[in-house]
Image (tube, grey):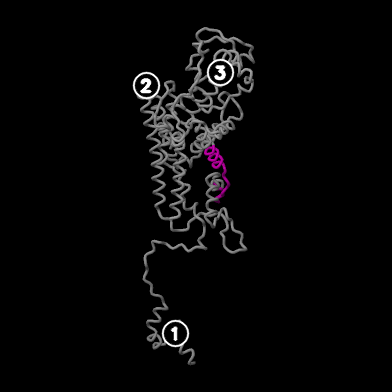
Amino acid sequence: MRNKAVFALIVAVIPACAGAALSNLPSLRLPLAATVSYAACAFFLAGICLRVLRWASIPVPFCIPTTCGQQKSLVWIRPDSLDNPSSGLGAAMRMGGETLFFRSLFRNTRCQVANTRAIFTESRWLWMGAIAFHWALLVIVLRHLRLFVQQVPASVLLLEKIDTLFQVGIPGVCISDLVLLAGLSFLLGRRFADPVLRYISLFSDYLALWLLAGVAATGLLMRHWSRVDVAGVKQFSLGLATFSPVLPHNLGSLFFAHLLLVCALVAYIPSSKLMHMAGVWLSPTRNLANNSRAVRHVNPWNQPVVTHTYAEWEAEYRDKLKEAGIPLEETDVEATYSN
Amino acid sequence: MRERVLIGTGLALFLALFTYPVWWAAASGTRAAAPQLQLPQHASACVAPASFMRASHMQLLSSWRNDAVRRGVHKFRSPDGRVYDVSLSGTCLGQCHSKAEFCDRCHAYSGVSTPSCWQCHNDPQLAARSIQ
């Protein structure tokens, strides 16, 4: 099973090698780097829009939220308004908790068989690794805004300041980088360590993680080992943002490896499981309010069914039934009064 | 229908956020120009090659700090054999560069948070004395 991981690693190394090769082509560096960057961004944006619009066009007529608490019913039963939201606002709040804190993953359990009995135990490690990785990634992406925006926003500078709070080394080691590395190592390591997980892990599971690891590794090496002319990098990224690409000459192979790995990752997002960044918002089991009792949900695809109820049948054959002495469901009004 | 509006709004918000550098650059008239630095007029070479200094000056200054403060070494021999005083205030700022027109410009341009150097080397007199 491990060859899937190796194969994914080989695929993930390709953009890094391509970047390193690109840095040795002085005349082609700028056009290729700019083209690849724009293509990746276009692919990313178009892909995300397409997939979201396709999801949006799928009807969701049924009330199918997954719930973890008491539904709103009678006034004297206290509803769990967050885990079983009865209104749109409640659903939005639950979605907020899901996106920001991964609340459903926090309830993760692990099933073990002990003495022929299945035992479910709480398992928070995945939640820990996931939340560490995702928050660190957000902070790192936001920190990179300093390279793309002229007059760097004060909030971005403040974020960097907080991130390098410990002032270890020059340039300072970022807390988010360490947390990201720890999270990534855990997420990758658990796929290697757990035989069950190793069995169900796919090539795409490994590829996403290897690409992220490659981006992190090249970025960290650039910051703490080989160094890069940050002003030159900023000139390049500003050139991309203003659609007039320029490329200072002193950017090394590590920078191009980082750039192409990011491009590969960004272009890979729309066609991979990384689309959960948009998909989580469009999950009907998460974004609906549980109003299955308060509101009638009619299946719009119901075929019109021709029915013939017993009452109708009895009315139709009333005289014949009476003649044969068969007891009737609906008593004869006149007979009742005449008796 | 309500969902369509909600999803459309969310998607528009995402597009706006992702393209923030693009529309911000267009709105503020940003050009992809290198930072305008005031270079020293009378000195032709830095203590190390300019390409090295652009990427790694903080390493050099950090090793200078260690040399001067911890090892008591106060002279630096450059790769081309010249000898300089190990002093940010005296050599870099005193002889060649203005903090405001050189250091700060590039740091502000790249959004690199000001290092701890200035906690010691930032007295107003020095700022006034540094080469204009």
Left or right position of A30 against B131: left
Disc assigned to residue A327: 1
Foreground label between 1 and 3 = 3
Q: Which residue is mark 3?
A: B98
Quadrant for the N terminus of chain B, please: bottom left
- Image mark 2: chain: A
Quadrant for the C terminus of chain B, please: top right
Q: Amino acid at mark 3?
A: Ser
Can you say whether A292 is above or below A255 in the image? below
Q: Position of residue B41 (x, y in %)?
A: 50, 13
* SS for callout 3: loop
Between the residue at mark 1 and the residue at mark 2, the CA separation in whole angstroms equals: 100 Å
Which residue is at a point 38% across and 41% down the rendered structure image? A46
Q: Amino acid at mark 1?
A: Pro
* SS for callout 1: loop
* SS for callout 2: loop
Foreground label between 2 and 3 = 3
Same chain under badges 2 and 3? The reply is no
- Image mark 3: chain: B
Q: Which residue is mark 2?
A: A26
Which residue is at a point 57% across and 60% down the rendered structure image? A72
Q: Which residues are magenta?
A: A107-135
Same chain under badges 1 and 2? The reply is yes
